[in-house]
Image: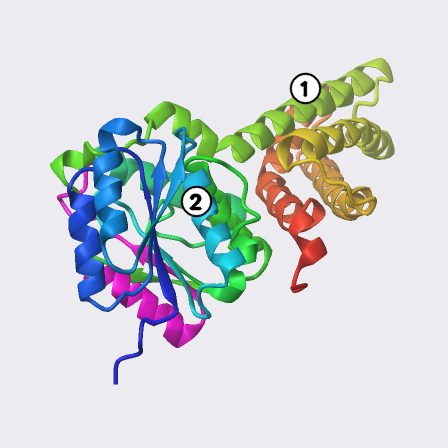
Amino acid sequence: MTESLDGVSVIIPAYKPDEKLLTLVDELTSVGFSDIIVVDDGGGRDFAKIFEDVAERPFCTVLTHELNRGKGAALRTAFTFVDEARRNGKGVVSADADGQHLPEDIKACALKMIETGKVILGSRDFSDPSVPKRSRAGNRITSIVFRLFFGMKVTDTQTGLRAIPYQYLKDVLLAKGERYEYETNALLILKKRSIPFEELKINTVYLDENKSSHFRAVRDSLRIYSMILKYIAASLGSSLLDNLLFLLINLIFDIKGNVLGTFLAYISARTVAALVNYLINKNAVFGKEKSRHAILRYLAVAVPLMLISATFVVWIGKALDVINPYLKTVIKMIVDTILFFASFRIQHQWVFNSADKNKKKD
């Protein structure tokens, strides 16, 4: 017996859509959906007729942004509408308006969500020759970044087909961003709040080399990677300060091969750099963390990492009989680079995780 789709809302953010939106809506009702919410993201008068036609169809609701605010804002508007109206008890499925998501795949994700109680991500096959090279390369890069920085294995990080159980809707609404970066940040919310998810293979559909997409390669990519880019910049800046101080202390006090002197030089330089790094990460990278415990969590991470790094720097320098301060600084830079990814994951997941405050409080 097939599970009923009653209680599942399909959400379609649409900016300047064509007739494919009407076709999609009709097909969704034909496969069993009875609540379809379309968001007109400021398309203007030229596209008003399409949205009027959507509103006249059964089971359809149209929400309107007077001005274009972005895909993330459109999704948030619809999620909030569903949450506040308490329209269902099962969940929502977001899908794109340009025909890339087939009705049977949207239905499959909804049914999988109902069956498992997990967030379901519709995953495209990027080995398919029909996938534009730009899309294939962009997704592979983002997947690698997610694995390295966040410890998340997601093969299709930018999929717009996502089924979200109702109980996790408030969590997803915490994600920041107004445009395409919202979808990336929503995935990170899943990680932060330990929300279960899995991927479901869907058909890979690209029409006219994906020319209908409103994704702006440079600007939107910068938005998507903004947190990581700011973290890298902050890390490079504090690392430069750290290594310069370490080198200067070695030169000024003529430490050379003295193990205790090297260790103290390391601790002194790292302490100053860590304070600078904390302030930057707190205010500019992970968002302003108001919890007074953030500094304690940061120290709980920074101090062990500092001791681990210092121990390896001293041990490697002693084992290789390195007394040249410049070579010792290079060894320190290599060790710190290895610890770089671990530090990011812990800071993102725990130190500056404001989502923890309200976790499981609903």
Residue identified by numbered label 2? 183
Judge whether residue 128 is colored magenta.
yes
In the image, what residue type sits under mark 2? Answer: Glu
In the image, what residue type sits under mark 1? Answer: Tyr
Residue at image position (45%, 72%) is: 117
Position of 172 with respect to 35 (left or right) is right
What x and y, as percent, mark residue 281?
A: 68, 33
Q: Residues within 10 Å of mark 2 (few under 14, many from 20)?
A: many
Under tag 2, what secondary structure? Answer: helix
Q: Quadrant of the N terminus?
A: bottom left
Which mark is on residue 326?
Answer: 1
Q: Where does the magenta region start and end?
A: 104-132
Residue closest to the eye, 258 or 7: 7
- Residue 141 visible in rendering: yes
- 1 vs 2, front mark: 2
Position of 286 with respect to 70 (left or right) is right
Q: Residues within 10 Å of mark 1 (few under 14, many from 20)?
A: some
Residue at image position (69%, 39%) is: 319
Position of 122 with respect to 238 (left or right) is left
Q: Quadrant of the C terminus?
A: bottom right
Residue closest to the eye, 202 or 275: 202
Under tag 1, what secondary structure? Answer: helix
What x and y, as percent, mark residue 272?
A: 81, 27
Residue closest to the eye, 112 or 225: 112
Residue at image position (71%, 40%) is: 309
Which of the two labelled residues, at mark 1 and mark 2, occupies the earlier sequence position?
A: 2
Query: To which quarter of the image does residue 323 belong?
Result: top right
What x and y, as percent, mark residue 109?
A: 31, 64
Report, in whole angstroms, how far the alpha carbon at label 1 lies from the one at label 2.
44 Å
